[in-house]
Amino acid sequence: MCSAMAVLAYQGAALDSDTWAINYNSDAAVDFTTSSTNDEIIMTYDIGTGKTPIVNLYASADCSDLSGGAAIIVGAGNVVVATDITTNSAGAPLDTRTLKIDIDKTKIDGSNIWNTGDSSLEFCVELTLEESGEVITQE
């Protein structure tokens, strides 16, 4: 089934006291064993205190340009069943938040995130912080 996986993330600017910051901690934990029933991918981010990010997933091998990547539909009956982002620890100016991605392993083969050439999953995770409908920052 899945012998390898590449989690791609675009690294943005360094964090400072700006509370609109998003920083991926480069710590993806992946579990595609037969005993895993959900949350196959877990990643953490440091995000401005009290800010709630919008999570989008894209079927793309190149996270530097998401304009060509198809949005991944999340929900029952799809390869990505759910995403969940929760606050681990609160602090100023940043909160540590955990993103969990639940993948239906039976739907990976033939999906738009499966690379048959090297038997890996390829998709991008985008987090966005908005205020009054305006994008403030993305990672």
Image (cartoon, rainbow, N blue to C red):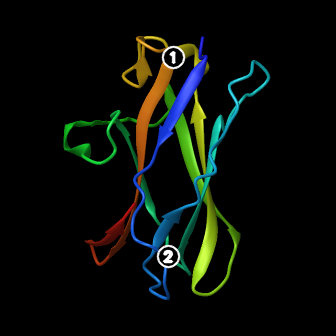
The kind of residue on which mark 1 rests is Lys
Residue 132 rendering spot, x and y as whole percentages: 29, 78
Q: The residue tagged with tag 1: helix, strand or loop?
A: helix
**Where is residue 38, by image quadrant?**
top right
Q: The residue tagged with tag 2: helix, strand or loop?
A: loop
The kind of residue on which mark 2 rests is Lys
Nearer to me, 110 or 83? 110
For the residue carrying disc 2, how many other residues have a C-alpha within 10 Å: few (<14), some (14-19), or many (20+)?
A: some
Q: Which mark is residue 107?
A: 1
Can you say whether 59 is above or below 95 in the image? Answer: above
Residue found farthest to the left: 67
At x 68% / y 78%, what residue is drawn? 90
At x 62% / y 87%, what residue is drawn? 92
**Where is residue 1, by image quadrant?**
top right
- Residue designated by label 2: 51
Mark 1 vs mark 2, CA separation in Å: 33 Å
Residue 131 rendering spot, x and y as whole percentages: 33, 78
Q: Are marks 1 and 2 in contact (CB under 8 Å)?
A: no
Q: Is residue 78 visible?
A: no
Nearer to me, 16 or 86? 16
Mark 1 or mark 2: whose residue is earlier in sequence: 2
